[in-house]
Amino acid sequence: MTQAKILDGNAVAADVRTLLTERVTALRESGGPIPGLAVVLVGDDPASQVYVRNKNRRAQEVGMASFEYLLPASTAELELLALVERLNLDRAVHGILVQLPLPKHIDAQKVLESIHPAKDVDGFHPFNVGRLVTGGKAQIPCTPLGCLLMLKRHLGSLAGQRAIVLGRSTIVGKPMAQLLLRESATVTIAHSKTRDLAGECRRADIVVAAVGQPEMVRGDWIRPGATVIDVGINRVPAAEAGKTRLVGDVAFDEAVAVAGAITPVPGGVGPMTIAMLLHNALEACCRQHDLPFEDLV
Ligand code: GUN
């Protein structure tokens, strides 16, 4: 039986970081700015703590300055807004990321909208969301941007390809669909109310699964030879008692026998998110200093 090509996110992310390291070094050696990334975490969610630590570590590895703000869960919304305002004005900070989710007493949308659009490395500000739709220079959300880079590295042009995005979240599904449209793919957005999800999926040359449902997409949903990008990271009980394991939104063992190419979980899309965050931070720095920036995607 044929096996799909495994799209290795660790390898692509490492390539991106190498390129960014070269660019950050060249910038510094030519007397230019040192890109600065500020990451803000409110509360003590263990998964968020790991993400934030990794974001800072990776930023430093490529030669950027990283600024970490770890605030208690009791932080008032006004205090957080005041910190964002300070970071907006700080010339050493080119990118600001406020880790989600925020504690319930804080209005996350209000905080995201308080970040200056030029420093919005997450691409969550309505200005950047709008620009993604209307065209023009925008900061693009990191996970969909990473998915697009993996797709283009594997397929080249996406023009005319039938793509389906499973999930309509603001962070992944909606921007992913816009990016695919920008590449001239024919895009379907499917969600929990979609009729005959399996049938819709089977028509697609490209499947991007971002629903947060462990192994929901079965092998017989996949068109033979299709490219499958699995954004899901779901922790489920393992066979061994008391242990857990990570699975995606796609039943990998089934899909790998049908697809042309597929991202694994872990080691697929996951590592790309931070790599593209660093890409966005360098882009933000270059634009704030009126320096040229060559897109990677
Ligand atoms: N929490 C989970 N993913 C993300 C992300 O991409 N950006 C931010 N700010 N928070 C997150």
Image (cartoon, rainbow, N blue to C red):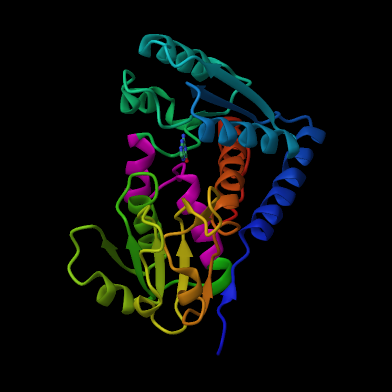
Residue in view at x 36 percent, y 80 percent: 220
Instruction: Pick whichever, 169 or 243, lies toward us.
Output: 243
Q: Residue at x 70, y 46 (%)?
A: 20
In reply to whether residue 142 is colored magenta, the answer given is yes
- Residue that sits furthest to the right in the current view: 29
Q: Is residue 156 visible?
A: no
Residue at 48% x, 30% y is 99
Q: Please check the rendered image and state whether residue 23 is part of the magenta-colored stretch, yes or no.
A: no
Question: Where is 212 relative to 195, above or below?
Answer: above
Q: Which residues are magenta?
A: 126-151
Give how far across and how far down residue 175 sits, in percent: 37, 51
The outermost residue toward the front is 241
| Residue 273 seen in the figure | yes
Relative placement, left or right, of 21 versus 76 is right
Residue 159, quarter of picture: bottom left
Q: How many marks?
A: 0
* Residue 176 placement (x, y as % from top left): 39, 55
x and y percent of residue 66 in the render?
A: 66, 27
Picture layout, residue 124 above or below residue 13:
above
Q: Residue furthest bottom?
A: 1
Taking depth in this image into account, of 64 and 216 the one nearest to the observer is 216
